[in-house]
């Protein structure tokens, strides 16, 4: 399983990248919210929701939020870690899945997190 960051979904929605076997990819509610807020109208919102329906949704639970708080305490000041990035990283760490993101600088300092290049 590979976790898709918002930037990857945006490029996929624009046809800039191809993702084969969508069943092997997932995202979380945070990524869903970031992705959907980019919709310019109702028709595009419907299209973005159709894109998301191809992938697996991982729910954000208390364990993820607790680890996110820990990451913000650890990296918030030193690396300017955002709440969103903390939740994404925590999800990947807890579920032991790799993160596909173009924004490697936002995550590279987290040793427990596997980043992939595709």
Image (cartoon, rainbow, N blue to C red):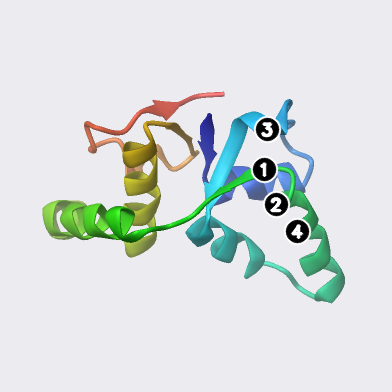
x%, y% of residue 19? Answer: 71, 31
**Cβ–Cβ under 8 Å for marks 2 and 4:** yes
In this rendering, is residue 64 above or below 23? below
Q: Relative to the observer, which residue lies in front, 20 or 78? A: 20
Quadrant for residue 95, please give it: top left
Q: Which residue is mark 2?
A: 52
Q: Relative to the observer, which residue lies in front, 23 or 72? A: 23
In this rendering, is residue 104 above or below 71? above
Which secondary structure, mark 3? helix
Mark 2 surroundings: few (<14), some (14-19) or many (≥20) residues within 10 A = many
**Cβ–Cβ under 8 Å for marks 1 and 3:** no
x%, y% of residue 17? Answer: 72, 34
x%, y% of residue 34? Answer: 55, 63
Number of the front mark, 2 or 4: 2
Residue at point 74%, 38% (across, down): 16
State the quadrant of the C terminus.
Answer: top right
For the residues labelled 3 and 2, the Cα–Cα distance comes to: 11 Å
Residue at point 24%, 38% (across, down): 110
Residue at point 38%, 46% (across, down): 91
Q: Which mark is residue 55?
A: 1
For the residues labelled 4 and 3, the Cα–Cα distance comes to: 17 Å
For the residues labelled 2 and 4, the Cα–Cα distance comes to: 6 Å
**Cβ–Cβ under 8 Å for marks 1 and 2:** yes
Q: Which residue is mark 4?
A: 48
x%, y% of residue 20? Answer: 74, 26
Number of the front mark, 1 or 4: 1
Left or right: where 28 falls relative to 81: right
Number of the front mark, 3 or 2: 3
In this rendering, is residue 60 above or below 39? above
Residue 80: tell me if it is visible. no
Residue 94: tell me if it is visible. yes
Q: Which residue is mark 3?
A: 23
């Amino acid at each position: 399983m590979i976790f898709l960051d918002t930037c990857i979904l945006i490029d996929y929605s624009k046809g800039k990248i191809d993702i084969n076997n969508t069943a092997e990819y997932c995202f979380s509610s945070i990524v869903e919210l970031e992705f959907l807020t980019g919709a310019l109208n109702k028709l595009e919102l419907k299209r973005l929701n159709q894109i998301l329906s191809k992938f697996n949704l991982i729910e954000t639970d208390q364990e993820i939020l607790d680890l996110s708080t820990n990451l913000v305490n650890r990296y918030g000041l030193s690396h300017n870690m955002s709440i969103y990035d903390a939740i994404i990283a925590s999800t990947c760490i807890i579920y032991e899945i790799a993160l596909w993101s173009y924004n490697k600088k936002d995550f590279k300092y987290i040793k427990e997190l596997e980043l992939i290049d595709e």
